[in-house]
Amino acid sequence: MVGTASDDAPLVDDRELVDRVKQGDATAYDALVRRHLARATMIARRLLGNVQDAEDLVQEAFIRALDRISTFDDSRAFAPWFFRLLINTGLNARKARALRAAEPEQGDYPSRGANPLELAEHEDLRERFQAALASLPPRQRLVVSMFEVDGLSTAEIADSLGISRETVRWHHHQARQTLRQALAAFRG
Amino acid sequence: MNDERRVVSLSEPERDAQLARAIRAAEGSPPSEARLEMLRARIASAAAAALEARRERAWWEWMTRWARTEVALAAAATILAAVIGGATSIGRGEIGADTVVAVPNVQTSGARLDSVATRAFAAGASSEQVMNALVPPPSGEWLLTAAVAR
């Protein structure tokens, strides 16, 4: 099973896995990939808005991490280092290539039993909110999602993005204002 | 904006459950286990060559490190063997049970010294003359003094 970065008590520390990866241990590399894959994929989707591009980005980031693992500072945590690498690669990819048209994603659709009016309202809300979310600058979108959905602290987000906590809080504040306005407009 | 930023940065923001639900709904469901498993296999396959290269490099680094230590140890062992072997062959070749070792006869030399001093005193030489004869003074002035005195 593919785990998540938030696994509470991993049997083997990331640091030990990184040490073994430096020696070319494929099992340790696989364990490291499993541990961070789910979160990496979500972050990549937020950055690129397309499942296929997001998966390509995640693969590229893991391969780059392997190439640069010798330069990784053992005294620091692996996850923020890796996510910073992923995010920077993603931001560059956004600029460099034309993205594929966004695929329809399986969302939090209402049940089939909902009446047509509820269905239309729900769909309208989702589309409006999606548009508001998509209109956010990439860093703001990442910050608000990592904080609200992934449950990371501002310090952890700051470490992953390579920016200060104050800047993270500022991005979060701005993003939340925009998104709350989108929700309020629909309700009003 | 700076004032607002300062106010914003004072404390950790509260989490907004409603906003979290809306973002989750807009982002779509997280990738399925099957999709993640396929991606993991793709990554493992793409990384195989790099990991293999890393394993080989690690082995060579290990070998080089040990080779250096082994060469140093071998050199030290060779030198030690040569020293021990040489000493043993000297002992075997030159020292036997019937070997006579020449040791300076300090007692004989002392006796000779005594007889010279006794004869000088018997001939009426002063103690200074005897001392000068036995222990030469630092300069040759004593020789000139002695000649003038005669």
Image: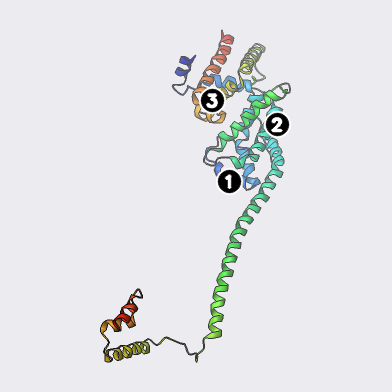
Report x, y in % for residue A163: 54, 27
- Same subunit, labels 2 and 3: the answer reads yes
Q: Earlier in the sequence, mark 2 or mark 1?
A: 1
Residue A159 appears in the figure? yes
Distance from the alpha carbon under mark 2 to that under mark 1: 26 Å
Mark 2 vs 1: CB contact within 8 A: no
**In the rendered image, which residue does mark 1 sit on?**
A19
**In the rendered image, which residue does mark 3 sit on?**
A147
The type of residue carrying mark 3 is Phe
The type of residue carrying mark 1 is Asp
Q: Earlier in the sequence, mark 2 or mark 3?
A: 2
Question: Residue at the spot x=30%, y=88% of the render?
Answer: B117
The image quadrant that residue B75 belongs to is bottom right
Q: Secondary structure at mark 3?
A: helix
Q: Secondary structure at mark 1?
A: helix
Residue A42 appears in the figure? no
Which one is nearer the viewer's eye here, B77 or A129?
B77
Mark 2 vs 3: CB contact within 8 A: no
The type of residue carrying mark 2 is Asp
